[in-house]
Amino acid sequence: MNTYEIIKELAKEKKISIRQLEFDFGYSNGYLASWKRQNPNPVELSRLADYFNVSVDYLLGREEKTSLAEKYGVFAFDGEPVTDEEVEFLKSVLAAKRAADKK
C-alpha cells in the first residue's frame, strides 16, 4: 500500500472522508491523492501521523501499525486490555501531575 492508501484506510476507520480530512487540514482538493505519484511533504506527513496516532514510518508503509498501548508498553490493567483512549487519558493525567509537581 502507498501512503495515500494508508491514509485513506485510517480516515475510513475514523469515519471521515479524504475530502473532509483535506478541508480540516487546509489542503487543496486532491492534495493527498497527489501523494500517490510524488513524495509526501515531511511536515504534513508528521501532522497526519500525529492526528491518526501512528508513526510516520507506518504512513510510509515501513512498519506495522501499533496501538498507543503497545507503543507505551501498557497492555492491560486489572486483567482488561488498555485502549488507546485510556492511554491518552493516562498521558493527560501524568502531564497534569508533572506540571503540578514543578510548581
Image (cartoon, rainbow, N blue to C red):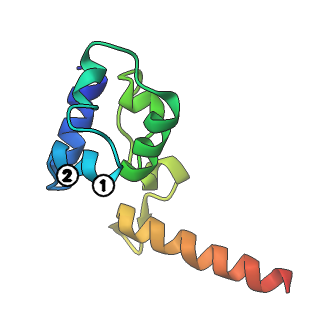
Q: Which numbered tag is attached to residue 96?
A: none
Image quadrant containing the C terminus: bottom right
Res 30 quadrant in image: top left
Residue at the location (41% across, 64% down)?
Answer: 76
Q: Tell me: 57 left or right of 28.
A: right
Res 101 quadrant in image: bottom right
Residue at the location (25% across, 27% down)?
Answer: 4
Query: Residue 25's spot in the image, x, y percent?
Result: 35, 50
Q: Tell me: 2 left or right of 50.
A: left
Relative height, residue 4 to residue 51 (above, below): above
Query: Residue 37's spot in the image, x, y percent?
Result: 27, 12
**According to the image, label 1 marks what residue?**
24
Query: Residue 84's spot in the image, x, y percent?
Result: 38, 61
Relative height, residue 102 to residue 35 (above, below): below
Residue 2 in sight from this viewpoint: no
Residue at the location (50% across, 47% down)?
Answer: 71
Q: Sort mark 2 into few (<14), some (14-19) or many (20+) by Cα contacts within 10 Å.
A: few
Q: Report the number of numbered marks.
A: 2
Q: Using the image as rendered, state which of residue 38 and residue 54 is in the foreground.
A: 38
Res 82 quadrant in image: bottom left
Residue type indicated by callout 1: Asp
**According to the image, label 2 marks what residue?**
20
Contact, mark 1 vs mark 2 (Cβ under 8 Å): yes
Relative height, residue 1 to residue 88 (above, below): above
Classify mark 1: helix, strand or loop: helix
